[in-house]
Image: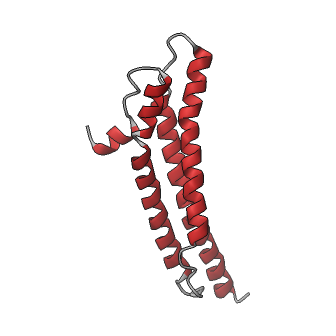
Amino acid sequence: MSPLVRLLYPLAARSRTPVAVIGWWERRRVTFNLVVGTSGLFSLGLVNMILGLPPLSGPVPGIPILPALAYGILANVLYSAGWGTELLFNAWWRKDPPEIGPVLFRQGLIFSVGLTLLPVAMAGLAWAAGFARWVLGW
């Protein structure tokens, strides 16, 4: 099994106890942070590159430290909501709940990476608008 498949399709916690569920999620937190952090660095690099292209080629914004730190903290708070949601679901379902942890983890990771890469699309649109203004002489 490839590392990507192991990352996106992990086996669920063996036990449905709160300690086992939280432990399952916490063992994946570092991986989550590495994936989202790497995509954030990639996103910052691409945004700076796109905004530095002509005809925009203004001052490159650099790395917004405080917003990046706030984003990382919020991502981890929402990551904790994953195991919180699973525990609430298990309490609600009571007897033999389905294993929703892997699905929540996968969807949360994919959403987080997509949200982290969103500034690249926004910078691309800003560049395209600037290019259109330049071409049309507006």
Frontmost residue, 108 versus 124 = 108
User: Of residues 41 and 94, which is closer to you in this image?
Assistant: 94
Q: Residue furthest left?
A: 1
Position in image of residue 12 (x %, y %): 41, 27
| As drawn, 111 above or below 60 | above
Q: Name the quadrant containing residue 28.
A: top left
* Most foreground residue, 92 or 104: 92
Quarter location, residue 69: bottom right
The residue located at (49%, 46%) in the rendering is: 110
Residue 24, given in percent of the width and then of the height, sits at: 42, 33
Residue 60, given in percent of the width and then of the height, sits at 55, 83
Q: Is residue 78 above or below residue 114?
A: above
Q: Is residue 18 left or right of residue 122?
A: left
Nearest the eye: 16 or 101: 16
Q: Quadrant of the C terminus?
A: bottom right
Relative to 133, is 8 above or below? above
Rendering colour mode: secondary structure
Q: Residue furthest top?
A: 95
Quadrant in which the N terminus appears: top left
Q: Is residue 47 above or below residue 115?
A: below
In the picture, measured across the screen, residue 57 lies left or right of residue 45, that is right
At horizontal 59% and vertical 18% (from top left) the residue drawn is 91
**Which residue is painted at 59% across and 38% down in the image?**
81
Residue 4 is left or right of residue 123, and the answer is left
Q: Residue furthest front?
A: 19
Q: How many marks?
A: 0
The residue depicted at 53 percent of the width and 72 percent of the height is 47
